[in-house]
Amino acid sequence: MLGRTYDNQLCSIARTLEIVGERWTLLIIRDVQLGLRRFEEFQESLGIARNVLTNRLSKLVDDGLLVRVCYQERPARYEYQLTGKGKDLLTAVVSLMHWGDEHAENPAGPPRIVSHAGCGGDVREQLVCTECGKAVGQDAILMLPGPALADSPS
């Protein structure tokens, strides 16, 4: 059984959960991707306690997903912006959103739709082979041992 931390797990998903697995983290990342930047905006959107939000934002900054930027000198006020590392979570956030739309759906329909700014078409995440460029379906994927498992007893 997994505990609160995944230190003994030789698994990329477990390591990722150490960073983004806390209940509020992906919701904060979602809100930043939606354009929210300030503490009060997050608090209003999420209904989260101030101390919990403060801790979450600090951890996201410490983990390099957000950067805290001063937007006002007197009094000092800050906003939060995604770093490249934080922006790289977009595919995961969209994928979780689409999964929820399909498997934990709201009777009124999806709360948000991801649309291509260029043509207005729907945007879907997909798995693509880096060698041939083709979209790869679930049945055509092999999950093989990587370099980290070379010295690990199976």
Image (spheres, rainbow, N blue to C red):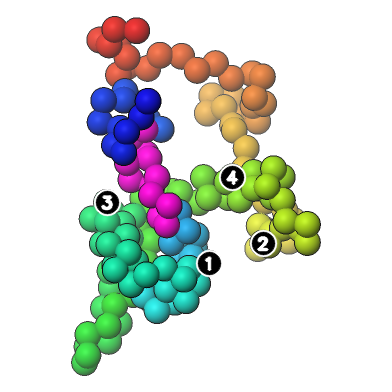
Most prominent secondary structure in the magenta stretch? helix
Name the secondary structure under disc 2.
loop
Q: Which amino acid, mark 3? A: Asp
Q: Which amino acid, mark 1? A: Leu
Residue 11, percent from left and from top: 36, 26
Q: Quick one: quadrant of the N terminus?
A: top left
Q: How crowded is mark 1: few (under 14 residues within 10 Å), some or many (20 or more)?
A: few
Name the secondary structure under disc 3.
loop
Q: Which residue corresponds to mark 1?
A: 34
Distance between the alpha carbons at the discs numbered 2 and 1 = 10 Å
Q: Give the range drawn in magenta.
A: 14-25
Residue 36 in view, yes or no: no
Q: Which residue corresponds to mark 3?
A: 63
Q: Which residue corresponds to mark 4?
A: 95
Q: Who's the residue at 48% across and 68% down the image?
A: 46
> How many marks do you count on the picture?
4
For the residues labelled 2 and 4, say whether their Cβ atoms are less than 8 Å apart: no
User: Reading the chain from its start, which is encountered first: label 1 or label 3?
Assistant: 1
Q: Which amino acid, mark 2? A: Arg
For the residues labelled 3 and 2, say whether their Cβ atoms are less than 8 Å apart: no
Residue 62 is inside the magenta segment: no
Distance between the alpha carbons at the discs numbered 4 and 1 = 15 Å
Q: Who's the residue at 40% across and 14% down the image?
A: 145
